[in-house]
Image (cartoon, rainbow, N blue to C red):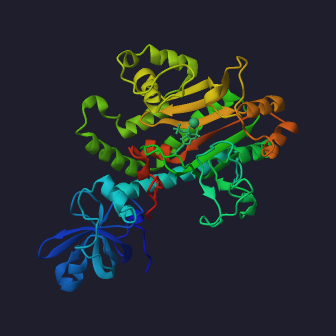
Amino acid sequence: MERLKIKEILVSKEREKDVVAKGWVRTKRGSKNVNFIAMNDGSTIHNLQVVANVENFDEELLKNITTGASLAVTGKLADSQGSGQAVELIAGKIELLGKADPEKFPMQPKRHTLEFLRENAHLRFRTNTFGAIFRVRHAMAFAIHKYFNDKGFYYMHTPIITASDAEGAGQMFRVSTLDPKTPPLTEEGNIDFSKDFFGRATNLTVSGQLEGELGATALGEIYTFGPTFRAENSNTTRHLSEFWMIEPEMAFYDLTDNMDLAEDFLKSLIRYALDNCMDDLQFLANRLVQEEKNKPQDQRSMELIEKLRFVVENDFVRCTYTEAIEILKNSKYYKTNKFEFPVEWGIDLQSEHERYLVEKHFKRPVILVDYPKDIKAFYMKLNDDNKTVRAMDVLFPQIGEIIGGSQREEDYEKLLGRMQEMNIPADEMWWYLDTRRFGTVPHSGFGLGFERFVQFVTGMGNIRDVIPFPRAPKNAEF
Ligand code: ATP
Ligand code: MN
């Protein structure tokens, strides 16, 4: 007999033949004569109502049907008497696949805090909230591949273990097979990495961009979508030690082309979510309203679906870093000392500043460009003013920076000069510099933090709740 997913059953017109549903019990309620079992199999946020007439089943079996238990139910579909669902399954046969002792199973049918669920990350998939989040996460990953494939970009797999630490000096995880107790030492007493597995010091990558540029300057347009690692000790709601990044890199794109792509890309992903994930988004929207009930009116965020539509329907503001500093300095917030961090030309913006620009000033997503060269990476293209670089950060409400990107410096001499100024070992980066020595072209790219984006789409406040198993300082349990 054919097993149907609950998602299919809920829209099925079949009333004659037996069907089989399999899943996990969410709740059971009922009377002396009849039990109503809400069953979920992960295919949808909605549960299937299974109706079991008590007289047809063993008492012991019914007793073991508790929250978390797994079942295979065979029976006929019927138009539902109750409200809330169109179809219910009248159980003919129930097979108990696995019990879940109610004394011990942590996921009880009540509201658990997100903190509690993080401590039970192995079981939190069983909740409505996390089911919705991870279905949306999947849909967004799929939409990303679809977007780029439709545009003729190639998916490029860049290495996870890398020897270049040009970008994140001091913030990388070392990869080594040396014995930490007795590592080989050089004459100067430093660890001798020439004896290590790769014959040199290696780390987990912080970005696939540099390798991505090698692909783009031949294949034209590529993107990476893989895990990246940062060993920075930031315990915020927007940082993970292991996160997924999408990094398109395009030959013959200048900064404007780059911005146009980033805006179109983000809007198209959100549109995909609105078109394909409405049940889950609706659930998450309601969840957010409940969560924010106790917040003062002015601290509540925009209703989730309204917010997503708003981003799709409005142009992003484009503004220079220098203009942004002016706006911040002239703001009431600044004048009444409401910012925790200083605002000064040359200083990197903090998320409080980014959010002010987006949420209070422009009331739209913002793309900031032309940042001071000293706060940006060596590979960004220098502007004619010699002070700023062709960088772009896309800032979103609630999140702050969601994308960081730039037009790359394609001039060999200028790039070398920047590397020397910033103490980047040019000899180790010979392979990167070769792109500028042979057939160099203007090119651009950016990095989208996948979890920050999923946070935005799901309305979740903490980044640890949008990745199945978060890695953060002192946190790698599951
Ligand atoms: P931030 O200043 O917000 O820490 P960053 O400037 O260090 O970020 P980039 O190096 O520009 O980040 O990385 C590109 C994108 O990757 C960011 O725009 C962000 O969406 C995401 N990202 C960066 N660091 C993290 C992190 N630790 N955890 C999750 N996402 C991150
Ligand atoms: Mn950045």
Viewer-proximal residue, 7 or 343?
343
Viewer-proximal residue, 440 or 345?
345
Viewer-proximal residue, 83 or 365?
365
- What's the residue at 43%, 80% (across, down)? 1
Residue, far left:
32
Q: Is residue 175 above or below residue 164?
A: below
Position of residue 348 measured from the top left corner of the image (x, y, whole percent): 54, 28
Viewport quadrant of the C terminus: bottom left
- What's the residue at 76%, 33% (across, down)? 420
The number of discs equals 0
Q: Is residue 210 left or right of residue 114?
A: right
Q: Is residue 445 left or right of residue 5?
A: right
Position of residue 30 measured from the top left corner of the image (x, y, whole percent): 16, 70
Q: Quadrant of residue 286?
A: top left
Q: Is residue 465 left or right of residue 437?
A: left
Q: Is residue 383 above or below residue 379?
A: above
Residue, far top:
330
Viewer-proximal residue, 13 or 416?
416
Q: Quadrant of residue 108?
A: bottom left
Evaluate whether residue 410 shows in this view. Answer: no
Position of residue 461 measured from the top left corner of the image (x, y, whole percent): 38, 43
Evaluate whether residue 168 shows in this view. Answer: yes
Q: Is residue 124 above or below residue 408?
A: below
Position of residue 28 measured from the top left corner of the image (x, y, whole percent): 22, 69
Determine the quadrant in which ligand 2 lies: top right
Q: Is residue 51 above or below residue 366?
A: below
- What's the residue at 88%, 39% (across, down)? 438
